[in-house]
Image (spheres, coloured by chain):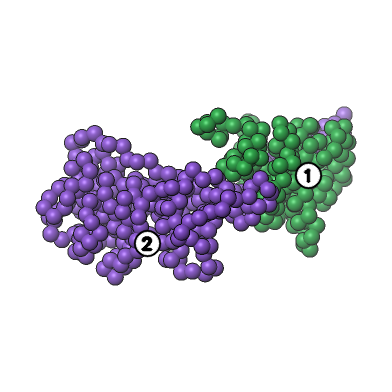
Amino acid sequence: MEGRPLEQEDDAELAERARRGEVAAYEELVRRYRQLAVRTAYVITGQSADAQDAAQEAFVKAYYAIGRFRAGAPFRPWLLRIVANEAINRRRSSRRKAALALRVAESRPSGDAAPSPEAAALAHELRGEVVTAMNRLREEDRLVIAYRYFFDLSESEMADALGCARGTVKSRLSRALKRLQREMPAPPPGEVRP
Amino acid sequence: MARELELRLLEGALRAAGSELDYPPDAGVWEAVAVRIAEAPTGRARFRLPALRLPVLRPPAVLRPAWHAAVAAVVAVALLLSGLLAASPAVRETVERWLGLRGVKVVQTPRPPSLPPTQTLGGALDLGRRVGLGEAGRHLGATLLFPAGLGAPDELYVRDLSVGGSEVFLVYRERPGIPRAGTTGVALLVSEFTGSMYRPGFEKYSFGAKIERVTVNGGRGLWIEGGHGLAYLDANGEVVQDQFRLAGNVLLWEQGPLTLRIESALSKAGALALAKTFG
């Protein structure tokens, strides 16, 4: 094992080394998951600095808690659970509830054949409405939707990250989507969405 | 059917929105975490530090002048890396925190390999591009300084710096007054670049060396004896390695807008005397 670059170690090996006191192994885990941690926190807090603080705090807490981390368990959802808790606490204690925002840059090619300008404009509008509706949801609903559709977690990862059974994940997601749909504006009669 | 279509549209819109959210940047997360971990390493018994005995150190006072902190940093890192590189990562993290090297990945510079003979004096020394006198001065962006009494340098080189700007090298072969330094035929290597060696984020660490603060031509400097490399922390927080190319000593100082460095086998007195002649 000596001399193998850290980038090639899997999460389980890195977590085990971190448990044994190797800070460098933990650093590699942080580098792997910092983006996901900050983004998950952002989905909950809606605010950039809070999200970064929550992610940092979560990584610090995870470091000290890594002795409790079960060897061989998946690291990512275990970490996300800590991140989500930090972010939720932060949002709850903040007086102003910040809102998610879309990046300003427009006219991004989706990778598929270029849609017509009208279709592209409608698609953009729909994304805006989706984000507006997300902003009206409770943190728990935003989180489960983000885990599934923003970050592509598997069902079993979602169960670990949310601390619930797999069957519960399905029903929580389904309820969250229904609440999201209720927050969406109804399309005007006759309009066809792309 | 309509409901299912609506759901699919919603899912598609969600995925697209997820990739277009204005997410915050995450670049500095490890650095912030490393500081916190180093500050309280005894969060768990497993990470408790062994007792650490480094003669020079105590945790820096809150607001020291940057100069003192920088010199202390150089001395301490030299001690650390000359003898204690095998110390555990937790030990190193704490020392790094003491030194204000927050989040810096301190790397050990390997000894320079023995160099094969080449056509040019400086060709194998990784000095960048060979240039003429006029071009060197232009790249430097300031007046190039020369030591007196040695004649013209035998070769000049220019190298781009990761922090921006260029470093100019003057290469002198052995000649009276300058002892040989190593096997390359180069007796004196002068480097010059625009900028302070202690501007924020640009700090030098020397490996395995004796380091002393000196004053040269009214400017602050360092005398580094027996070292074999330097590492810089550049503006991006990346560690940039710069080997000592000759088997010699280094005198480094600030003069006007420049930072100068001379590598040679000169003694401290000899190097200081030579540095006084730069103009």
Residue at (87%, 29%) from the top-left corner? B1
Chain letter for the green part? A
Badge count? 2
Q: Position of residue B4 (x, y in %)?
A: 85, 31
* Figure quadrant of residue A9: top right
Q: Which residue is mark 1?
A: A143
- Disc ID at residue A1: none
Question: Could you tell me if residue B246 is visible in this image?
Answer: yes
Q: Chain of mark 1?
A: A
Q: Nearer the viewer, residue A99 or B29?
A: B29
Residue drawn 49% across the image and 69% down it: B64
Report whether mark 2 lies on the same chain as mark 1.
Answer: no
Dot 2: chain letter: B
Q: Amino acid at mark 1?
A: Leu
Q: Indicate the chain coloured purple by its letter.
A: B
Q: Is residue B59 left or right of residue B207?
A: right
Q: Position of residue B228 (x, y in %)?
A: 34, 46
Residue A66 coordinates in the image, percent (x, y): 70, 42
Name the mark on residue B196.
2
Q: Position of residue B7 (x, y in %)?
A: 82, 35
Q: Nearer the viewer, residue B184 or A169?
A: B184
* Quadrant that contains the N terminus of chain A: top right
* Distance in Å between CA atoms under marks 2 and 1: 48 Å
Task: Please name the amino acid that badge 2 sits on.
Answer: Ser
Which secondary structure, mark 1? Answer: helix
